Image (tube, grey):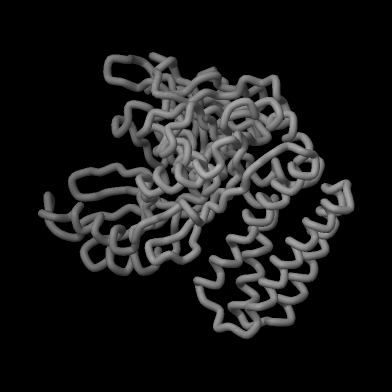
Amino acid sequence: MKVLKFGGTSVGSPERIEQLLPIIKSQTADKHLVVLSAVSGTTNDLVILSELYAGKDIEGAYRHIDALYEKYKVFVSQLFKTEEGVSEASLFIDKIFDLFYQFKNKNFTSDAERIILAQGEIISTTLFHLHLKEIEIPSTLLSALDFMLVDEEHEPDVDFIREQAGLEMAKYPEETLFITQGYICRNAQGEIDNLRRGGSDYTASLLGAALQAEEIQIWTDIDGFHNNDPRYVPNTKPIAQLNFDEAAELSYFGAKILHPQSVFPARKYNVPVRLLDTMNLSASGTLISGETTNQNQIVAIAAKDGITAIRIQSSRMLMAYGFLRKVFEVFERFKTPIDMITTSEVAVSLTIDQTEYLSEIIKELEVFSAVEIDSDQSIICIVGDFRENNHGHATIVSEAVKHVAIRMISYGGSENNISLLVPSAFKVETLRSLHNRLF
């Protein structure tokens, strides 16, 4: 069995859905589980709708629902070709939008918001299933709410997913094509919840890992990981193979093609992930597996924006006992992850990309240290084989950026990357200089 995930742009219009059919038709001999995101733009629309309801702007919410309803009416009229198909899809859309109107008389809570946000994937998967039915391609629509579960720490319950997804699919022993929603799940209280933004990749990886799939395929609109960001750097090239650690570094530090969390379930259960291009079916894409194929090589560069650097210097004597522990405890209390870190005897510099609690964090740090903040920074991540027996890579990187003001360097914490922190104004220059020197 293979798990195939298609993102929002891949189902973003009737024309794009039609382009998926050759992929679907070519793989129906064996069992396949298709995971879909919401139609491109829909999740943003549903976030806006939730904000309008939360702000008690009922008239604004109704106008927003009406506008989104008109979009989907056009979508249905263009996707479906038969009277029966249009009728069945229209009845379904009417039911969903009736649900949206019902929140006017309720005290709008986070539970209500999660119910609204879940409808994006429910819409896309149901319309896709009904379209396949119209063109006589058999498929079975499964509700992710029956098997995708997170625990009280919002971590996926892989054992439950394995058991329940297997039971749901076993109800249809003759079927080979299954469709389900990405992103959405239930929480430990049984309420509708979600895996956060980018969660459809995560859903596909969790299902592929839990069901021990032959392969997880992530279909997007680019032919795999590139060795640099093609938006800023000319003449980038796709990477044929990566190991799980390399892919995790690239996805975490800025490569948008794959959500960072989606690598970890596949790595843990050793299920290969293949990144493919819906617009170029002949492209081989990128295969991510447990094999190390890029020995003693630098393979790619990625950049992560929106970084804030924090320099924390102990206000007490040298070698103050417990200083680092106190620093980390502050970030732990506010559930704020740290990206990069460098230390000296009496100071630590670190970076974060979540600044929701920055003012509170600074206030607590200033009780026992002096704090300096630099915003508008970017992390440049150079990924490759940096094991201790390999020589010269750090020197090459340093030479490539000797004209750039480097705020921080992190090297040695991982065998797979060197990370540089630079002001965001110098990001593109840094990417291009590294690319010209390394590739």
User: What residue is shown at x 79% (from left), y 67% (from top)?
Assistant: 67
Can I make out residue 181 in this image? yes
Is 21 above or below relative to 312?
Answer: above
Q: Residue 113, how many percent across, how many down?
A: 56, 69
Q: Residue at x 34, y 36 (%)?
A: 410
In the picture, measured across the screen, residue 386 lies left or right of residue 307, that is left
Q: Position of residue 73 (x, y in %)?
A: 83, 60
Residue 397 drawn above or below residue 390: below
With respect to residue 309, does 209 lie above or below?
above
Q: Is residue 432 visible?
A: no
Residue 391's image quarter?
top left
How far from the left and from the top, in percent, is residue 207?
47, 41
Residue 108 at x, y percent in the picture: 56, 79
Total marks in image: 0
Image quadrant occupied by the C terminus: top right
Q: Residue at x 54, y 35 (%)?
A: 3
Residue 353 is left or right of residue 333, and the answer is right
Please give the name of the residue rendered at 62% of the width and 54% of the height, measured from the top-left corner.
121
